[in-house]
Image (cartoon, rainbow, N blue to C red):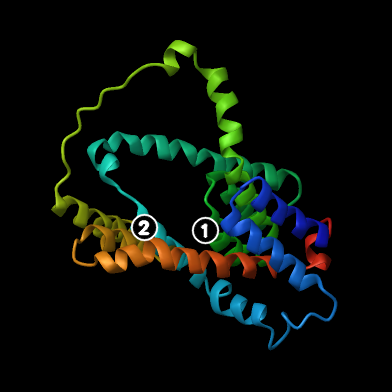
Amino acid sequence: MFLLGGLLIYLAIKKDYEPMLLLPIGFGAILVNIPFSSAIGKDGFLTILYNAGIANELFPVLIFIAVGAMIDFGPLLQQPFMLFFGAAAQFGIFITTLLARGVGFSLKEAVSIGIIGAADGPTSIYVANLFAGNLIGPITVAAYSYMSLVPLIQPPVIKALTTPEERRISMDLNLHKVSKTTRILFPIIVTAVAGMIAPMSVGLVGSLMFGNLIRECGVLDKLSRAAQNELSNLVTLLLGITIGSTMVAENFLTWK
């Protein structure tokens, strides 16, 4: 586990792969695997952070508030058909779930692993904690490692599926301006609709849309900037080192 933790730290520093998360995860993995470490146990600070932020899904929810404050839904509201592009990406969840089920994972474990297919780190953590707490460490590392490799994976795929002429096409967009009222109503309506369709999603969807409402309302600029910067950075730091604390060798390196 020392080697794995060191590898994550190396990738974060040397390769710049998701450094804000992989570095604290790697260091947390080292801390938790030191014999007789005081960082874990009843009074260990990593255990306290886990109970306060992961066991009750607080950290992922706070991350979603910060992400919501960063998102500009203007392009989506201007071109609603873009929803179909996002919907197509969700097929990755089902494909990954079926593959995980096929290699012997239980249904709940397979579902937790399947969320990685959406390339969504906080959601992967949230679902893994609900259905497969024993896999939260490997799932988090896999999700964020996969996301950090996207810039390496995309170029050859794009070149394989398009011609040089197609990649040089200039697309002129004549988009209408989205009113402030629409921007404010959008997160409220999405939260209400999501809550009626899937009440279990309100924790994540509601926090994401709350962050966006802070951004768009126009009267909470200081809170919006704080959510985008201080809140995001602090929670990501605590989330990373806490996830690293779940990477105990007895669990992480066991083949099941």
Q: Which type of secondary structure does the marked residue at label 1 adopt? A: helix
Q: Nearer the viewer, residue 19 or 217?
A: 19
Q: Is residue 93 left or right of residue 192?
A: right
Residue 136 seen:
no
Q: Which x, y percent locates residue 206?
A: 36, 63
Dot 1 corresponds to which residue? 122
Query: Relative to 167, does residue 231 appear above or below in the rendering?
Result: below
Query: In the image, what residue type sits under mark 1?
Result: Pro
Which residue lies at the image location 37% right of the left edge and 35% below the top edge?
84
Q: Which x, y percent locates residue 247?
A: 74, 65
Which residue lies at the image location 48% right of the left edge and 13% below the top edge?
164
Q: Is residue 183 left or right of residue 25?
A: left
Image quarter (top left, top right, bottom left or bottom right) of the N terminus: bottom right
Query: Relative to 113, does residue 46 appear above or below in the rendering?
Result: below
Image quarter (top left, top right, bottom left or bottom right) of the C terminus: bottom right
Count residues near mark 2 (Cα–Cα under 10 Å), then give few for <14, some for 14-19, many for 20+.
many
Which residue lies at the image location 65% right of the left edge and 59% below the top edge?
23
Q: Which type of secondary structure does the marked residue at label 2 adopt? A: helix
Query: In the image, what residue type sits under mark 2?
Result: Gly
Q: Residue furthest front?
A: 14
Query: Relative to 46, does residue 62 appear above or below in the rendering?
Result: above
Residue 23 seen:
yes
How far apart, in angstroms, are the residues tagged by discs 2 and 1? 12 Å
Residue 219 found in image quarter: bottom left
Which residue lies at the image location 37% right of the left edge and 65% below the top edge?
227
Residue 175 found in image quarter: top left
- Number of marks drawn: 2
Q: Which x, y percent locates residue 128?
A: 60, 61
Dot 2 corresponds to which residue? 68
Label drawn at residue 250: none
